[in-house]
Image: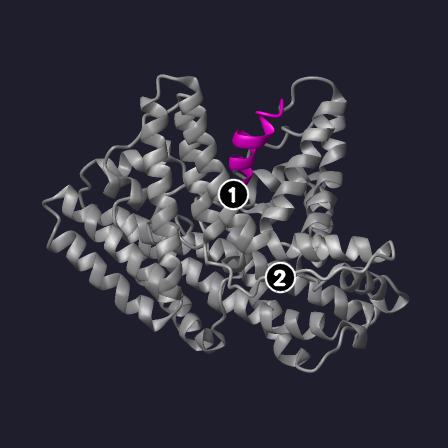
Amino acid sequence: MLFNSIEFVIFLPIVFFFYWFVVNKSLRLQNILLLVASYYFYACWDYRFLFLLMFSTFLDYYSGIKIEEAIDVRKKKFWFWLSIIVNLGFLGVFKYYNFFVTSFASGLDSLGIGVDVFTLNVILPVGISFYTFHGLSYVIDIYNGKIKAEKNVVDYSVFVSFFPLLVAGPIERATHLLPQIQKMRVFSRLQAVDGLKQILWGLFKKVVIADNCAEYANIIFNNSSDYSGSTLLLGALFFTFQIYCDFSGYSDIALGTARLFGIDLLRNFAYPYFSRDIAEFWRRWHISLSSWFRDYLYIPLGGSRGSMGFKIRNTFIIFLVSGFWHGANWTFIIWGGLNALYFLPSLLRGKNRVNLDIVAAGRYFPTLREFFSISITFSLTVLAWIFFRAENVGHAFSYLQGMFTWDLFKIPYFPGIGLAVSTLILVVIFMLIEWIGRESQYAIQHFMNPWKRNVRWVVYGVILFCIFLFNGREQEFIYFQF
């Protein structure tokens, strides 16, 4: 069930109605309703994998209780490692098994040793990387004594499988979400209206910007050997805006939907393409994942403590693991490594935590220095996205080779370039709106407030019209594959 599908348009109001007008007097019934709705939402993808989600949920729920109750350190460690190994085992089998065995076979083949390997013909369960990380953080926090185990199985199950975040995040923490699940929610008109506005903006990002950009990015990337360097650069730009609007659009819809039910989820994007360096970019891109790796991998490895050599090692580990989290392909690992290289200058100069505020706060325009910093950071990001989008490493390098030629300065051309220009205009308008609203949680949250009510409703109507106009190009969200 896609957020931008007619099924979800029917599903959401039904759940909302029962939640606030039928079971609103009972917290227990509200949470049961959320759990049933979440399981139905997930079963619409593939009901067979619902049992995997339920098993993983119960394993972590039970392990958390046993870890907390254990007096013997060995028993505590047993339940802790059982949860970690089983969860990562499922993730490894479904997501990484074929990658490891084929890479192993290719390595032996390069040495002249031919082997036959057994690969699995399985579908990747949607959202497995996200709900697995929910459970892992929960168990790790209990083991480290940061939180108490949740005894209510319904409340814990809602934490893991709350439908707005189930298949593509944000990756929640028990310390943030569980307390909201455990307390009575009271309907707030202001919160609901704010949620609807964020859903509207998320749908605009996804349907109007991302899906349009995807069409042209696919044409260019799938036939990259046929096009000039300038056209390849245009394809990279189309994908750059596709992946941002696709994933941040999903996050906006997820956060907005959760607000309809009186729940606030973790913010996942904070205008990353306005970053002044790569360190700032990663504080603003997929925030829930970046902070997860920081807290559960980077800091346990030693973080920024110790020698510069240790800092560099930890940085590369974080970025390479982050790349591998995105998919079982060497392109993702290279993408992660490339971002680590981008990050190094800031780390070596001790300036990786310089740009903590939003750029040009309280001003309409950035300084010349800020403008160049944003431009350089954005350009490096575009180059890295080529590896993320390419089918394989060879394709990525051939794409770059074809792009950096003298015809990079020609006027780009490919079939459909005329319609693509209109998409570029939409992208420019979109980025202007993002720039104006960059100090808010999402772009249209406050920047129209000074306008008259009638004018605001006209703008909302135009956004809604654009969503309906372009909805025929419906595509799955990119991060469903991760």
Coordinates of residue 359 in the picture (x, y in percent): 59, 39
Which numbered dot is residue 44?
A: none
Viewer-side residue, 265 vs 463: 265
| Rendering quarter of residue 417 | bottom right
Viewer-side residue, 293 vs 386: 293
Q: Is residue 339 left or right of residue 92?
A: right
Query: Which is nearer the N-term, disc 2 or disc 1?
Result: 1
Q: CA distance from mark 2 to mark 1?
A: 19 Å
Q: Is residue 208 left or right of residue 415?
A: left
Question: Does 237 appear above or below 70?
Answer: below
Question: Mostly what secondary structure, the magenta segment?
Answer: helix
Q: Is residue 255 left or right of residue 411?
A: left
Coordinates of residue 273 in the picture (x, y in percent): 61, 49
Q: Which residue is mark 1?
A: 88
Label 1 neighbourhood size at 10 Å, few (<14), some (14-19), many (20+)? Answer: some
Question: Does 453 appear above or below 312?
Answer: below
Viewer-side residue, 186 vs 100: 100
Numbered disc 1: secondary structure: helix
Label 2 neighbourhood size at 10 Å, few (<14), some (14-19), many (20+)? Answer: few
**Amino acid beneath label 2:** Thr
Residue at 56 percent of width and 54 percent of height: 95
Numbered disc 2: secondary structure: loop
Q: Which residues are magenta?
A: 287-302
Q: Which quarter of the image is occupied by the N terminus?
A: bottom left
Q: Which residue is mark 2?
A: 119
